Every structure is written in structure tokens, then in C-alpha cells.
């Protein structure tokens, strides 16, 4: 599959995982040569800026400025590739505050998440703001709950961020 084809399918898969005012997604292709974690963090920062500008969240975030790229990098923890699809499906489908509430049917989220992870491939790197070792979340948005999963194959990226009024 060509890079353009991968990008189109990646964008479509991520769009399936989005829920207005709750689960924000982004997918794209890096323009920088040899992108690494700082470039991925810059895309995360841009997604945070878009959320802050969204009318649904602006009132909760007066004066909010997304964390700097180094601060975003510091908040990220690696996720093993085999755990990326289930985690992505969870970010998209299960509400942070009310886990019994579903934003998407589990099957829809799992199918789309599996497709996104397979498009980025087995060598992709995946990152979250969750510290699995202690169960803590390195929040990216003050006063709100957030859950992020970001992945890259070194050319393309996929981001999903759920945000909730805790």
C-alpha cells in the first residue's frame, strides 16, 4: 500500500474512533525528516490546542496553554505494540468518569483500533500518558480527566485523546 493509501485509511480509522466533545483524534504524515518523540509530542500539543479552542471545552480551560513539547514528552510512557489496539479501543469507547457508559460499541472500537494499529505496523512505537506501573495518569489538561494514546511508524502518526469533566 502506498503512503497516501495508508494515510487515507489511517485517517478513516481514527475518524471512526472519534466522539464529538469527548474523544478527539488526529492522524497524519510527518513533514520533518526522521521524526521522533518530539515531533509526535508536537502533534499531541496541536491536538490539545484544538481541544482548548473547542467551544465545548473553552469555558473549562480559560487561559489554558498546552504543555510545551518537552513537557508532553515527559508525560509520556511507552506502550507495547501488542497492547496498543486494546488500549486505543478503550480510549475511544469507555468513558473516563463513568466506565459503564460507552461512547462507541466495543466491537466498533475494537475493529477500528485493530485496523489503525495494523496500518502503523508491528515496528510502530506507542505512547500514553498513563503510568502502568503505578496506575497514575500524567494529566495533560488541568482540572479535567484525560487519556491519550499516540502511535507512529516513523512516517505516519495516530492520536486519540479522551477528555472528561471529572
Image (cartoon, rainbow, N blue to C red):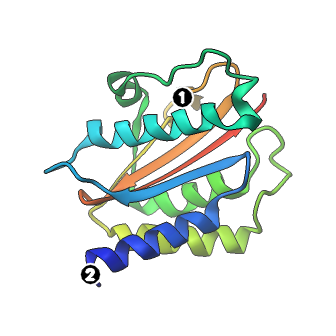
The quadrant of the image that shows the N terminus is bottom left
Q: Which is more foreground, mark 2 or mark 1?
A: 2
Identify the mark at residue 153; answer none if there is no mark: none
Question: Height in image: 118 above or below 39?
Answer: below
User: In what element is the residue under mark 1?
Assistant: loop
Q: Quadrant of residue 71?
A: top left
**Residue at x 38%, y 59% (from the top left corner):** 28
Crowding around mark 1 (Cα neighbors within 10 Å: few <14, some 14 to 19, many 20+) is few
The quadrant of the image that shows the C terminus is top right
Q: What percent of the width, then of the height, locates residue 77? A: 41, 36
Question: Height in image: 48 above or below 122?
Answer: above
Where does label 1 land, which residue? 134
Crowding around mark 2 (Cα neighbors within 10 Å: few <14, some 14 to 19, many 20+) is few
Where does label 2 land, which residue? 2
Residue farthest toward the left in the current orientation of the protein:
33
Foreground pick, 53 / 61: 53
Amino acid at each position: 500500500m502506498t503512503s497516501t493509501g495508508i494515510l487515507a485509511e489511517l485517517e478513516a480509522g481514527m475518524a471512526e474512533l472519534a466522539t464529538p466533545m469527548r474523544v478527539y483524534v488526529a492522524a497524519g504524515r510527518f513533514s520533518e525528516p526522521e521524526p521522533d518523540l518530539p515531533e509526535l509530542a508536537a502533534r499531541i500539543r496541536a491536538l490539545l490546542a484544538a481541544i482548548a479552542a473547542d467551544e465545548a471545552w473553552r469555558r473549562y480551560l480559560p487561559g489554558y496553554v498546552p504543555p510545551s513539547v518537552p513537557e508532553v514528552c515527559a508525560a509520556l510512557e511507552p506502550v507495547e505494540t501488542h497492547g496498543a489496539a486494546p488500549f486505543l479501543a478503550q480510549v475511544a469507547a469507555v468513558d473516563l468518569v463513568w466506565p459503564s457508559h460507552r461512547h462507541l460499541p466495543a466491537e466498533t472500537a475494537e475493529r477500528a483500533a485493530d485496523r489503525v494499529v495494523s496500518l502503523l505496523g508491528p515496528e510502530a512505537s506507542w505512547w500514553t500518558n498513563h503510568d502502568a506501573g503505578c496506575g497514575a495518569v500524567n494529566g495533560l489538561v488541568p482540572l479535567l480527566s484525560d487519556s491519550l494514546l499516540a502511535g507512529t511508524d516513523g512516517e505516519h502518526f495516530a492520536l486519540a485523546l479522551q477528555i472528561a469533566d471529572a
